[in-house]
Amino acid sequence: MRHDACRLAGGSSLSPDALRSDAGTPGWYPCGMDHSTSIDTLGHGKYLSLTTFRADGTPVATPVWLIRDGDVLRVLTQENSGKVKRLRVNATVLVASCDMRGRIKGAQVPASATLQAVDETARTSTLIRKRYGLMGRMMTWMNERGSRKAGPVVGAGHVGITIRLAP
């Protein structure tokens, strides 16, 4: 089901708080979705649009692979990527199901993202490789091989991101 009317308009510089029509009400989600519906829908998708925000508030959306782990979503990315730099400054994100090119398939949902420690990143990497099969193993191997870090570091070149949907 598409929820185009609930999407953040492309190129808009709205903050996640500006999307909330009833910012004071806990548990608010676009289009009447609740937390369990959102996490289920997002967790079943093959790709996730992860929107981070620049210092000036400009949204930057990136399609990423994901894995659902309980009540959180986990993604894996290059540790020197722009999204990691932006998350170090502002942990507020928007997430939505999308296709491999980043075209949003559902409503964007407000969330917070935290960068994972090395052991958590290793777990995320393992789960991603398991879910995405041969392609997942190839991509993580190529990224680890291309890492500029010296020595055999688990998850070298990667950092995991834990995403928690807003309450």
Image (cartoon, grey):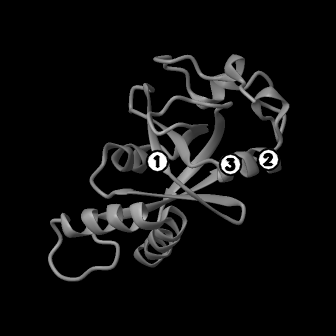
Residue 80 position within the rendered picture, expressed as x and y whole percent measured from the top left = 27, 53
Q: Which residue is mark 1?
A: 64
Q: Residue furthest bottom?
A: 152
Residue 6 position within the rendered picture, expressed as x and y whole percent measured from the top left = 70, 22
The image quarter containing residue 57 is top left
The image quarter containing residue 23 is top right
Identity of the residue drawn at 65% across and 38% down:
110
Find residue 93 and name its label.
none
Find residue 35 and name its label.
2
* Tag 1 secondary structure: strand
Residue 64 position within the rendered picture, expressed as x and y whole percent measured from the top left = 46, 47
* Tag 3 secondary structure: strand
Crowding near the residue tagged with mark 3, few <14, some 14–19, many ≥20 C-alpha atoms within 10 Å = many
Front residue of 167 and 62: 62
Crowding near the residue tagged with mark 2, few <14, some 14–19, many ≥20 C-alpha atoms within 10 Å = some
Q: Disc 1 and disc 2: Cα gap in Å?
A: 21 Å
Amino acid type, residue under disc 1 in the picture:
Val
Is 161 located above or below residue 98 in the figure?
below
Crowding near the residue tagged with mark 1, few <14, some 14–19, many ≥20 C-alpha atoms within 10 Å = many
The answer to which of marks 1 and 3 sits earlier in the sequence is: 1
* Tag 2 secondary structure: helix
Find residue 165 and name its label.
3
Amino acid type, residue under disc 2 in the picture:
His
Identity of the residue drawn at 18% across and 64% down:
146
Amino acid type, residue under disc 3 in the picture:
Leu
Front residue of 91 and 2: 2
Front residue of 50 and 84: 50
Q: Closer to the observer: label 1 or label 3?
A: 1
Q: Disc 1 and disc 3: Cα gap in Å?
A: 16 Å
Q: Closer to the observer: label 1 or label 2?
A: 1
Q: Disc 3 and disc 2: Cα gap in Å?
A: 7 Å
Q: Are marks 3 and 2 in contact (CB under 8 Å)?
A: yes
